[in-house]
Each structure stands twice: as C-alpha cells, then as structure tokens.
Amino acid sequence: MTRLIAPLAFGLVALASATYPLVSRSIERRERGVSLQQSPLEAGSRPPLNPAYAPALRQFWGRSSSLTPRVGIQVGHWKHDELPPELVRLRDATGAQSGAYREVDINLAVARSLAELLGSAGVATDLLPATVPPSYLADAVVAIHADGAARVTARGWKMSTPWRASAASRMLLDSVAQSYGEITGLPEDRYGITYGMKGYYAFSPQRVLHAVSPFTPCIIVETGFVTVAADRAVIADRPELVARAIAVGVLRFLGARPRAVTPDGRLAYLPPSYPVAVVAAEGSELRAYPSPDERIVRRLERGTMVMPMQLRGDWAEVVVRGNFRSFGWVRRDELGPMG
Ligand SMILES: [Zn+2]
C-alpha cells in the first residue's frame, strides 16, 4: 500500500505546486537561501517543481506502473534530413564517417538488434529517428551514436545523462555503463564526454519541443569510434554484441526501477534543481571525477558562478555559468550560496 500512497502523495503535492504558481514561488524563495551543505535533496525535502513541467507531470502520472515497460531507442542521425524547423541546424549533422563506414548505419544496426533483444524479453520498444516525438514518455530512452576523431589515441565508448539528470537517469547510466564495458570488452573513453552529449537536444525539453519528457530516464551512448579499426571490429562488425551489452544494462535497470519517491525522500524521476552557487575558495580545482587524485580540468577563481547538478559525498558536479564547456567536480566546502 505504501508503494501506492507515497507516489500519490508526491503527485498531489507536485501537481498542487504546478497548478498554483504561488505555492511553487514560495518554495523557490525558501530554497534560494539554502546552502549546498544543506541541500534540499539531501535533507529529504522536495525540490521546487518547475511549473513548465506540469503537463509532462500529468502525462507521467497518467501512466500505470503495471503497463508493459516501454523503451525508446533513438538511432543517432537517422532521417536527419526530416528534422523539424526548430532543429534545422542539425539537418546537416550526418554523423561520423570513415571510408565506407557511416555512423548512421552502425547506429541503425545496433538499434534494430537492441529492439529485437528487448522485445524478446517482453519490453515494448520504439525505434526513434533523429526527431523524437514531443514529450516522449517511456521507462527508458537510449540514444545510440558512434564517435569520430582524428587523434590517433582515440579509443572506446562513453555515455552520459543530460545535464540535469534524475536519479532514475543516473541509475540507467550506471547499469548500462557496467554491462557495456564488461560485455563488449571495449575500453572506456573516460575523459571523452562532451558538453554536447550532456546538452543533447533530444533530452532537452526545456529548449526543444521534440524532446523526451523530463520524466523519462535517458542516456546517450557513444558505442565506440567509427574512425578506429579496433573499435569498428566490435561496433561495425558485431552489432548484435553491442546491442546485447546495452540490453543487459537496460533490462537490469527496468528490473530495479525506482519508485517515484525513494525511501530517502528523493524524487526519482524529477530532474533536480539547485540554486546557483559561487566559488568561495581561491583557485578551486575543477576535476574530471569526484576524487582529489583525478585530473584537473581547470582552476576556478573565487567568485566564479557555477550551477550544481548533483552531489556525491564531499563533491558537487557543476557547470560554469555561461561556459558550458567547463564542467566537472569541485569540493562542496569550496562553494557557497549566492549572497
Ligand atoms: Zn552521432
């Protein structure tokens, strides 16, 4: 019964916030003064709901959790010439290429095989082209891409959630990253994640109409490099292996899908929202991963404004405000709230 009640309670509160802007405004005002050390998510209370999410939330709530799980598989660059006017700048984005090998062909082969595998496991699938239906709602979406690079050291796969990822999106990422590395045997391109992946248009409902619902857990997967023969030996020559590596992670995620409200009070499907923070320490180090031994991306001057996206232990993942190419992890005690 609590399984049912907790989500219902969340739905009513969230809908009330969305329906009555005054309520959500007062919540926002209250949370602006909260420091990162007492983050609303960690305190177990509810972050403010962006009123723009209200229609998507109603749609999310209208789905019964007893339905057959549904997974959207987006084929990177597929039917790129049919992108709508709002995405006209991407109509020329045909993807990576190396000789006769085209990324879109690799993406399509992997995606078709993935749809088959998930289908045989009882999962409903949608094979999506570059154009995603507006507010596309599913239990998971995986965007399939392959990378291209001129540098000779390029190798392997990488995957990412959107900038502001729900807990469910991060679970999906962890699950697929684990199975993908194990099953393909390909190395991880550990420092290769770009701001373009994090700001992927199809996962940006705040910017683009043809994007997934903010409540859809989603990741973008770069399966390997089209331009590297050793990667091609897997991604181009063995698409069914690549598909299996993704399917195992997706199925594991679906089997452990979080409740709408997790026991510690987090809203599993709602992208978090943190107040803008300011770097309070001199020469704070922005690192690629949350560890003092990790590679330093750059140093941040005191007073630099950053947007926190997730917290982990003593660390906060941030992007520098106004410079989306600068992102990484800083120590939380070096951040302060805006004055
Ligand atoms: Zn691509």
Image (cartoon, rainbow, N blue to C red):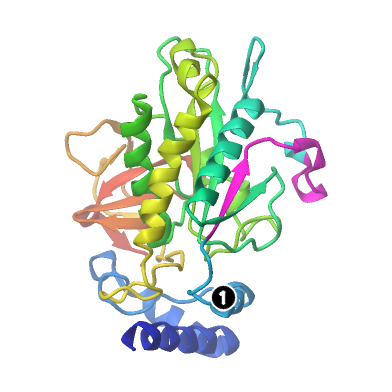
Q: Residue at x 46, y 68 (%)?
A: 270
In the image, taking residue 169 as reference, residue 93 lies left or right, namely right
The x and y percentages for residue 302 are 31, 48
Q: Residue at x 62, y 59 (%)?
A: 205
In the image, taking residue 302 as reference, residue 129 lies left or right, namely right
In the image, taking residue 102 as reference, residue 195 lies left or right, namely left
Using the rendered view, name the quadrant where residue 76 is placed.
top right
In the image, taking residue 69 as reference, residue 309 lies left or right, namely left
Q: Residue at x 61, y 72 (%)?
A: 56
State yes or no: residue 83 in magenta. Answer: yes
Residue placed most toward the observer, 276 or 135: 135
The x and y percentages for residue 6 are 36, 85
Reply above or below: 5 against 225. Answer: below
Reply above or below: 293 against 317. Answer: above
State yes or no: residue 175 in magenta. Answer: no
Residue placed most toward the observer, 158 or 300: 158
- Count of numbered badges drawn on the protein: 1
The x and y percentages for residue 265 are 30, 76
Give the magenta part as a residue range: 70-88
Residue placed most toward the observer, 302 or 153: 153
> Which residue position is annotated with label 1?
63
> Is label 1 in a helix, a strand or a loop?
loop
Reply above or below: 204 against 329. Answer: below
| Residue 18 visible | yes
